[in-house]
Image: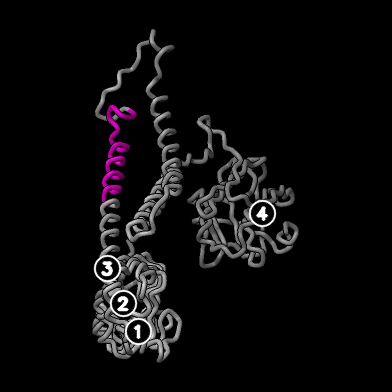
Amino acid sequence: MGWITEDLIRRNAEHNDCVIFSLEELSLHQQEIERLEHIDKWCRDLKILYLQNNLIGKIENVSKLKKLEYLNLALNNIEKIENLEGCEVLTKLDLTVNFVGELSSIKSLKHNIHLKELFLMGNPCADFDGYRQFVVATLEQLQWLDGKEIGRSERIQALQNYPVVEEQIREQEKAYQLRRAKEKEEALGKLAEGCEQEDKKTNPGTDGLPSTDIPVTLPSSSENKEQVQLPEIQEDARSTKKLNGSEDDLEFWNKPSLYTPESRLETLRHVEKQRKEQEKLSKKKKEVKPLRTLVTDSGKALNVNEPKLDFFLKDDEKHNQIILDLAVYRYMDTSLIDVDVQPMYVRVMVKGKPFQLVLPAEVKPDSSSAKRSQTTGHLVICMPKVEEIITGSRQTAKSVKPMLDGNREQMRTSGSTEGGGDSECPEGHMTRETLRELQ
C-alpha cells in the first residue's frame, strides 16, 4: 500500500527546494496511494494537486485547502463525490474513469460556486439516461462538462426537464447500487476463498506434501529400491512449489475479472506479492552463492581473475624482480583495492573481487611495493626475487602485506622506508621508463 508521507511530498517538491509548507503545485500520480491524507495539514497553500492513477477510494482531508483551484483524481476508485465544500476557489475537478455511480452526489458541488469544469466520463453514472441533462441542471455554475461547453439553450432545456430526469436518475442509481452490492459480496467471497487456498498451500497437511509436523520414516536398506529418499522428496517439493507459483501467476492474469475497485486492489496485492517473492528469491540466491576457492586444501594457490581485468607479467632480470601490471579501472578509488603479496603468488582484491596470480619464481613479500599510474590508473606491483641479493639500503620490513595509501594513491610496504617515488625500481617502485614499457 502506498502512503502519503512527508518524505514522498518533499521528493516531489524539488521545484520548490523541497519546502512543502509554501508548495503551490504537487504531483503524486502513480504512487499506489489508497488513502488521501495529511496534505491538508502540510500543504495549505496548494493551488494544483495531481493524484491521478492511484487507488484512492474516497475524497477526504482536502477541506482545508482554501486556495485549491484544480484537483485531478482521474483513474482512482472513487464512488461518491463528497467533502469538497471547503475548497472555496475550486475551478476544475477531474474524476475521469472512476466508479462514481451515485450521480446525485454531485449536489455537494453546489457550494463550489467557482467550479467551471467537471470531468465524469468513464464513470458508471456517465452511462445513465439523462446524465448530462441532470448535471447541467444541477450545477448551474458549470461552463464545461467532459470537455464540452455548456450552451445557454442546453441549460434552459435541462432545467425544464429536470423533474423527469431526476426521477430517471434516482431509479438508475438504485439499480446500480444493487449491482455494486452483489459485486462487493462476490469480491469478499473470492477474498475468503483465496485466503483459504493460501492456508492450504502454506500448511498442506494430508492434502499436499508432508508438513513439518508429520514425522517421515526413512526407508530401510531393503526398501531403498522401492521408496523415495527424503532428500529427493524435499527436492520434488521445491520444484513443485516453483512450478505451482508460475502456474498460479498465469492463472491470475488469465482469469476473467470485472473492472471494479476490488479488482484493482486485488491486482495491486498480487503484483506486490510477486515482487516480494522475487526479492526474497534474489536475496536467497545471493546468500547461497559459493565462495571462490583461492587456495586448495593441499595448499596450492589457484589463478583467479574474478574482476576480469587485463594484466601483464614481466620478469625484470636487470633488477631481479617480477613486475605485475594490472589494468585497474582508471577512475576507481584506491581505497577499494587491497594487495597481498606472498612468496609464490600475489592477490589483489578489487572492490571485494579477487585477482590472484601464481608467480613463476619465489619473491620477497616484505620488499615488494606497488603504486597506481596517474595517467592510466593501472596498478604496478614490483616483487624482488629471492635468488639474488638486491643491493640498496632499506629498513627491515615488519609486515608481509603491502597496503594501499588512498591519499597518495600508491602502495608501499608497511614499515618500510618510503622510496624516491618514480626513480628506483630496486627499492620497490617503478621508473617512468619501465611504466611506459608496460603500457
Q: Position of residue 333 (x, y in %)?
A: 54, 63
**In the image, which disc is placed on residue 243?**
none
Task: Work out whether residue 108 or residue 60 is closer to the camera in this orientation and state it.
Answer: 108
**Residue identified by numbered label 3:** 171
Residue 140 occupies quadrant:
bottom left
Name the N-terminal-most of marks 2 and 3: 2
Task: Work out whether residue 211 or residue 113 is closer to the camera in this orientation and state it.
Answer: 113
Say if mark 4 contacts mark 2, CB within 8 Å: no
**Residue identified by numbered label 1:** 158
Q: Element under label 1?
A: helix
Query: In the image, 360: left or right of 84?
Result: right
**Number of numbered discs:** 4
Say if mark 1 contacts mark 2, CB within 8 Å: yes
Say if mark 4 contacts mark 1, CB within 8 Å: no
**Residue identified by numbered label 4:** 325
**Residue drawn at (41%, 85%) of the image:** 144
Please rate how many residues cluster around mark 3, counting C-alpha atoms within 10 Å: few if below 14, some from 14 to 19, many from 20.
few
Name the N-terminal-most of marks 4 and 1: 1
- 242 over 395 or under it: above or below: above
Q: Nearer the viewer, mark 4 or mark 3?
A: 3
Name the N-terminal-most of marks 1 and 2: 1
Q: Position of residue 321 (x, y in %)?
A: 67, 49
Amino acid carrying label 2: it is: Val
Write down the region rendered in magenta.
Answer: 188-209
**Residue drawn at (30%, 83%) of the image:** 138
Amino acid carrying label 1: it is: Ala
